[in-house]
Amino acid sequence: MQHKIIPDATLVNNYINGDENALEILILRHKNKVYSFIYSKVYDRDVAEDIFQDTFIKVIRTLKRKAYNEEGKFLPWVMRISHNLVIDYFRKNNRMPKFDNSNDFSIFSVLSDGELNAEKRIIKEQVENDVRRLVDELPEDQKEVLVMRIYKDMSFKEISEITGVSINTALGRMRYALINLRKVIDKHNIVLTN
């Protein structure tokens, strides 16, 4: 006999009404998506783990206070909480993540938007995974600069200090990384769209 998948909204209600188990199911169901999103912004496993835990502490507190009224849209609500905690983390560290870039890399902004229909969301995630794979194909030195610049939003001065190369070398590596990415994208006919 097949288990019927219990909708998020039902699980939320069950948890509010005292079923501790329901929360565990919700966390396990959405763990990968929420954690991947956080990690794609902070690019540090320990920090991502902390923010992930803080996200669900906030979720639990809100549910316990019976202050949740998202009309069953549980995942987008959780993603918004994690998004805000990521921003708080960067503020505390005087650095902002790149959320809304208007250039080629707007694809790195992967906030799961409740308005996106399932098909669009799957495509968006697929492209995000493709881009990650492409970045992994870059030579190590280029990948390092690209990750620092785009994921960690570091200045070229910071990158040059950390990697021990001149600012010009860091800029050069970034340029080559982008040229190579573009080549791979063209080769694979990948269409990067919002």
Image (spheres, rainbow, N blue to C red):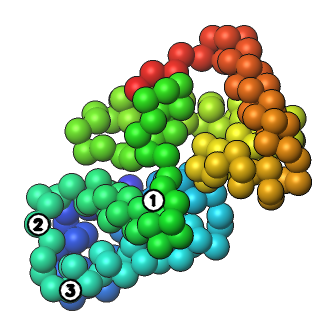
Vertical side of 159 occupied by 104: above or below: above
Q: Which residue is mark 1?
A: 34
N-term mark: 1 or 3: 1
- The residue lying at 80 percent from left, 50 percent from top is 160
How far apart are the alpha carbons under marks 3 and 2? 12 Å
- Residue 3 in picture, x, y percent from top left: 36, 60
Q: Is residue 58 left or right of residue 101?
A: left
Q: Which residue is mark 3?
A: 64
- The residue lying at 67 percent from left, 11 percent from top is 186
Judge whether residue 85 can be spotted in this image.
yes
- Residue 132 in picture, x, y percent from top left: 65, 38
Q: Which residue is mark 2?
A: 69
Check disc 1 and give the amino acid type.
Val
N-term mark: 3 or 2: 3
Q: Is residue 47 left or right of residue 157?
A: left
How far apart are the alpha carbons under marks 1 and 2? 20 Å
For label 2, count other residues whose C-alpha is less than 10 Å away and answer few (under 14), some (14-19) or many (20+): few
How far apart are the alpha carbons under marks 1 and 3? 21 Å
